[in-house]
Amino acid sequence: MLRIHCHVRFGHLFEVLLMKLMKNEDAVSPVIGVILMVAITVILAAVIAAFVFGMAGNISKTKIVAATASQQGSNTIYITYQGGQDAASVSTLAYSITGTGGTTVTGTLGTAVGSSKADGTATIGQDHVTATAKFTDGSSQVILDTYV
């Protein structure tokens, strides 16, 4: 019977290989962590700067007022100002009627709630009626956009 003795220690070889693998893996996790923390800090700083320096923009509040339009007869359109929550801040009301032939008639309405204007230039068919309110703060808003 023949016995061979080997002087190579497999345990030592395994430890060396394991240390090399673990050494390479340890470096990845801290680098990714630092990159993520820097990215979060930059994004947070940008959001705070946008609010502090007013870069979010000026968003105007929508005013609540209304007008209605109805056609009576073949050529008369009545536009009536209905008022609303912001009726007190309306300075002028303007309207526009565009007939099917392409002609446009413009005018103004009274700012009192319930005021009405009759226009006798309507055409047979669908006339496009718009009304725009101008407010005391300088803003304007379309309050009626319909076909009659």
Image: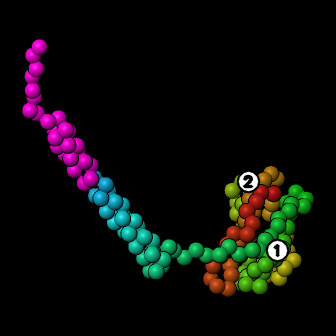
Q: Is residue 2 visible?
A: yes
Image position of 140 (left or right of 16) = right
Q: Which residues are magenta?
A: 1-27
Does 76 appear in magenta?
no
Image position of 76 (left or right of 4) = right
**Label number found at residue 63:** none
- Label 2 Cα crowd, 10 Å radius (few <14 / some 14-19 / many 20+): some
SS assignment at label 1 = strand
Q: CA distance from mark 2 to mark 1?
A: 24 Å
Residue 14: x %, y % from top left? 20, 39
Q: Earlier in the sequence, mark 2 or mark 1?
A: 1
Q: Quadrant of the N terminus?
A: top left
Observer-nearest of 124 and 18: 18
Residue 51: x %, y % from top left? 48, 77
Please, what is the three-letter code of the amino acid marked with disc 2?
Thr
Q: Residue at x 81, y 57 (%)?
A: 148
* Quadrant of res 59: bottom right
- What residue is shown with label 2? 100
